[in-house]
Image: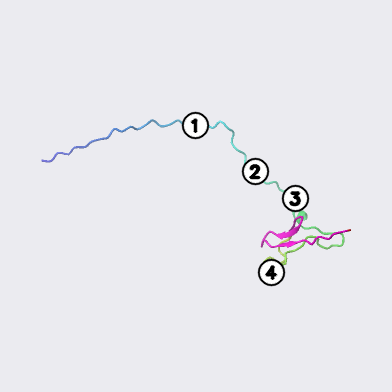
Amino acid sequence: MRTLSLYTLRGGKKKKKKKKIPNTPKKISHIRKKVKCSILNIIKINSNGLQVNEICRNKSCFYSCFLANHSNRNSCGRCGRSYIKKKINLI
């Protein structure tokens, strides 16, 4: 005859912790403002009908993106190429 003995371990199980209630208000996420006719801010045309913005001369993004105007350079946002402006000294 065999005897089967089964032992249960009564360990140190703890009580469940209470759920903490947040004290601070929920953060409101930023909502993008829509601007009507936003393309008019990007493309600038002078009185003669010529485009003021320069276009990137790289073959991969030719005629598809304009150059960003910085104080000392123009840079393309798509390919990362930058063209340094020449300074003209007026005496």
Query: Reading the chain from its start, which is encountered first: label 3 or label 1?
Result: 1
- Tag 1: amino acid: Lys
Provide the residue designation for mark 4: 59
Categorize mark 1 by other alpha carbons within 10 Å: few (<14), some (14-19), many (20+).
Answer: few
Could you say where residue 11 lies in the image, as x and y percent from the top left?
Answer: 31, 33
Q: Please give the label number shown on residue 30.
A: 2
- Nearer-the-camera pick, 72 or 29: 72
Residue drawn at (72%, 67%), measured in percent from left and top?
57
**In the rendered view of the protein, which quadrant contains the C terminus?**
bottom right
- Tag 3: amino acid: Lys
Cα distance in 3D space between marks 2 and 4: 37 Å
Task: State which region is magenta.
Answer: 68-90
Q: Is residue 3 magenta?
A: no
Query: Reading the chain from its start, which is encountered first: label 2 or label 4?
Result: 2
Residue drawn at (70%, 46%), measured in percent from left and top?
33
Residue drawn at (77%, 62%), measured in percent from left and top?
54
Provide the residue designation for mark 1: 20
Cα distance in 3D space between marks 3 and 1: 45 Å
Query: Reading the chain from its start, which is encountered first: label 4 or label 1?
Result: 1
Could you say where residue 85 lies in the image, as x and y percent from the top left?
Answer: 77, 61
Compared across the picture, whether 50 is left or right of 33 comes to: right
Q: Nearer the viewer, mark 2 or mark 4?
A: 4
Provide the residue designation for mark 3: 36
- Nearer-the-camera pick, 71 or 46: 71
Cα distance in 3D space between marks 2 and 1: 27 Å
Q: Secondary structure at mark 3?
A: loop
- Tag 4: amino acid: Lys
**In the rendered view of the protein, which quadrant contains the N terminus?**
top left
Could you say where residue 16 lies in the image, as x and y percent from the top left?
Answer: 41, 32
Q: Secondary structure at mark 2?
A: loop
